[in-house]
Amino acid sequence: MRRVIAAALSAAGLLVASSTPVAAESDGKVATISDARVTESSGLAASLRHPGVVWTHNDSGGKPQLFAIGPNGAVKATITLAGAKAEDWEALALGTDESGRPALYVGDIGDNKAQRTDAAIYRVPEPEVLRDAELTPVRYRIAYQDGPRDAEALLIHPSTNRVLVVSKSLIGAGIYTSAGPLRADAANTLTRTAKAPAMVTDGAYSPDGSRFILRSYLSSDMYSAPGRRVGGVDSPVQPQGESVTFRPDGAAVLFGSEGADSVIWRVVLRGANLPDSVRAPVAAPRPQPAAPPPPSPSPTTAPEVPTTPASPPPATSEPPAPPSADAAAPVAADVSDGDTWFDAANPWLWLCLALAGLLGTGAVRLRRAARNG
């Protein structure tokens, strides 16, 4: 009898455990970069070969090196780019080489004075084994259709290797794209294709290429294509938010910051911000049962009298069906910088208004003090 009771209790426990919902993943801290060599983490890329590893690099003035950061925040390997200059490294992106193997692209694209003529992108293969090494990179020269500009965001499309570079500016920022994969034997001129938010510090494509994110110090935005904004993404408050990357499964993004002992944060994506490969498919509508056939006429029914067929009713124009929630938004025109700047959703507008208010209040107080003095 005791065995029967024990078996029944065990089965009941399994039933309760199986019916308990699994807690949804939440935003939170992933790791703290504790290595003293990494004090200005300015780019971030989640490894495609090594689960839990992210790649990063220092800002301008450092050595031309990439650091593999493990889940505990420690450096697992250092890759030195032989012959490369670290003039102003600002971005790191995942891509592939000509053979389709995973590769890391480094953007030496910072240009605070907007006058550089030697902006470049370096490419090295992502190593299969994590150990210190020196690799010779492929160097791609880049230029902009409308002249030099400062930039901190480099994105590589995972399927086409097409390049996106986003300029960094308070007013007039834009998304610049290459005509195709980069060429090492000639300068690659990037064309402005869409407007961009103010002060973008990094960006990244989702693993399936259906989404890309652009972040600034204050906010982040998700896109399905240049000019097609999907929605905003909650960004963590960081001392100097400089980097972002998609997690390899596409369900979350990782945010990084400059500074010693900087923290990598995870933000889980939801709704339309999720890449196409991650979102749950929409359930097909259930088929409706067929209408029953009309009853057969009774034998005593009077013979049918022929009648003139009625004319069909006049055709009416039905309103078009509303677009589905998953339909992409129309491509936004590259509107004037004034229209972009005075958008109520622009956090920089409100910051400037607040600063103007503080300055105005200070000026009034100084004038009053001068009069009273």
Image (tube, rainbow, N blue to C red):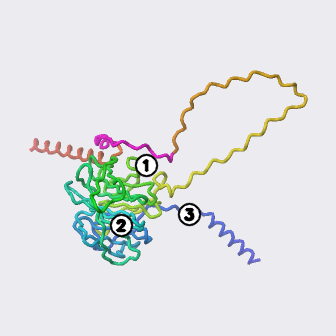
Q: Is residue 326 magenta?
A: yes
Could you tell whether 8 is left or right of 340 in the image?
Answer: right
The C terminus is located in which quarter? top left
Residue located 63% across and 63% down the image: 19
Could you tell whether 169 is left or right of 17 in the image?
Answer: left
Q: Nearer the viewer, mark 1 or mark 2?
A: 2
The front one of 211 and 306 is 306
- In primary-sequence order, the first of circles 1 and 2 is 2
> Which residue in the protein does label 3 denote?
22
Residue located 39% across and 59% down the image: 161
The N terminus is located in which quarter? bottom right
Instruction: Say what amino acid the circle numbered 3 marks.
Output: Val
> Which residue in the protein does label 1 denote?
230
SS majority, magenta: loop
Question: What's the CA distance linking mark 1 and mark 3?
Answer: 28 Å
- Provide the residue span drawn in magenta: 325-343
Residue 220: mark in rendering:
none
Instruction: Say what amino acid the circle numbered 1 marks.
Output: Val
Instruction: Say what amino acid the circle numbered 2 marks.
Output: Leu
Could you tell whether 46 is left or right of 121 in the image?
Answer: right
- In primary-sequence order, the first of circles 1 and 3 is 3
> Which residue in the protein does label 2 denote?
104
Residue located 34% across and 55% down the image: 164
The front one of 371 and 47 is 47
Q: Is residue 254 magenta?
A: no
Disc 1 + disc 3, Cβ < 8 Å: no
